[in-house]
Amino acid sequence: MKRTLTLTLVFAACTLHAQERYLDEIFENVTVTEDVEYAVNISVIPALQGLPPMAMPQLMDVYQPEGDEETARPLILVFHTGNFLPQYANSSALGTRKDSAVVELCERFARMGYVTASVDYRLGWNPLAGTQEERTFQLINAAYRGVQDARTAVRYFRMNAAEMDNTFGIDPEKVAMFGDGTGGYITLASAAIAGWNDIILDNEGNPIEVFWYDPGDGSSIPMVIESFNGDPEAKNDGFTPDSVQLCIGHYPEYSSEFNFQMNMGGALGSDKWLDAGDPAMVSFHCPHDPFAPYATGVLVVPTTQEPVIEVTGAYGVHTLINSFDAPNNNDVFQSLNLADDVSLAANEINEGMDGLYPVLNSYVDGAPTEPFDSSPWQWWDVAMTQMVDTANGSNIAATQLSLNPTMGPEEALPWLDIIQAYTAPRMAAALGLTEVENVSETNASKASFTIFPNPTSGLTTFDLKSPAIQASMYSLDGRLVRQWPLVGIQGQFSVELGDLPGGTYIVQIDGESQRISVTR
């Protein structure tokens, strides 16, 4: 039977709840300083074109809250995806510091009072190498350079704060890293690798087999050699035996340490890198990701579909964190007693591992309807990519859309809302910025809308305390199930929800979310 949606409006005056820095967006606008050079280092991209490796500038864009009077603000470094290959050469429309999701995250967290930086890192490897050992060797070296660059960027800001009058107004003791896709691999490794031996030896001092290779004479050689490649922080130069420079050291007197790591769809190169006492971590990962395993498995490169190396995804990482003796790396989250809607939704599906958010995107009856859409927070400019395809004779846009037909801001932004809401209180606690206790209780009186009755079996009323633009309802796996334009409505409106399957849903109105239970 077709049901008719009825809106009942009762206007009432009220005000928005008071907002708190680092938990809410308290600034209207951000300023962006583009093309900031944080270092110069050796790129192998020219080598892929038959040229020797050469020094190239490393750039980033820095976002700051406009009109902010604070001069010692926490810093977030954000790293994009791209499989360590240039945009489009990686068979994707993504892969730069201008990626839509990266820019959106930088702007959102800058409006919350952070300084954020979208950071480029060195690219280059050959995914078409003939054997898995060759592909592994090249990818490990690419990831090693990415870790070096991430840590160099941290030290640049500390150097800038100490020697250049703190151009960006950061607090050098409060630093976080975010990573999307490949950037997640970089940030996880940057958080976990303590030194060069940590890469090639396990905790008992035995070689980690996957990081060694046979040069052809029956011996074993590490795939990364510190004197050749530079140390994992890129504080020191690295040269091959024939004097080809592979690393330029920077800012050796400063620390590369940081306090918090968040990754979206990344994985850890080896679970043996992770130790108790590493930075607190938050992870968003699709269990059905066909390329990066959710637990532990072999990484498949999207460019070629070829297997490369065994890695540990978010589920495996957080399982290991929770196996450490208390206090473990993420105990700071558990002590918060967070009971906000997004946390409660995560807790229903993360097996009690606070910090892990399984991204169940477009699931029906326990299976994904779009099995290749493992990063629903990403989107890109279709028209621009089609222009590139026309110019290059490629088919990137059509291929990507066939794998992810719902790609776009309409799908991505609600997921970024969840990522922001889940990450913000945990990062604030890990950085020592604010005390967050039981968000559901502290914010109950501040909520900008209420829902009643809740639970409901039919007619349901939303009471808006300020004018709103749009209301949306999502299932816990992220599917949009209802949407209502509000066009400035303030007060009460009623909707019929009795035709929905019983269960728990998330109602979002202009960026604020609450849970509702529908009974049958």
Image (tube, grey):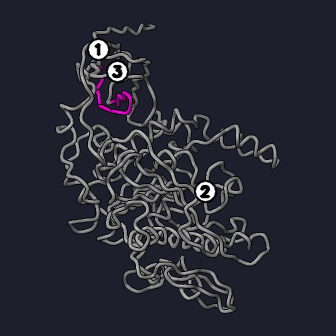
**Residue at position x 64%, y 90% in the image:** 218
Label 1 packing within 10 angstroms: few (<14), some (14-19), many (20+): some
What residue range appears in magenta?
505-520
- Indicate the amino acid at tag 3: Pro
Q: Earlier in the sequence, mark 3 or mark 2?
A: 2
Q: In the rendered image, which quarter contains the C terminus?
A: top left
Q: Is residue 395 magenta?
A: no
Location of residue 460 with respect to 31 vertically, above or below: above
Residue 281 spot, x, y in % from top left: 35, 59
- Residue 82's disc is 2
**Residue at position x 26%, y 43% in the image:** 20
CA separation in Å, label 1 and label 2? 46 Å
* Image-quadrant location for residue 192: bottom left
- Residue 492's disc is 1
- Indicate the amino acid at tag 2: Gly
Residue 54 spot, x, y in % from top left: 69, 76
Q: Is residue 519 among the parts visible in the rendering? A: no
Label 2 packing within 10 angstroms: few (<14), some (14-19), many (20+): many
CA separation in Å, label 1 and label 3? 11 Å
* Image-quadrant location for residue 432: bottom left
CA separation in Å, label 3 and label 2? 40 Å
Which residue corresponds to mark 3? 467
In the image, taking residue 210 as reference, residue 253 lies left or right, namely left
Q: In the rendered image, which quarter contains the N terminus?
A: top left
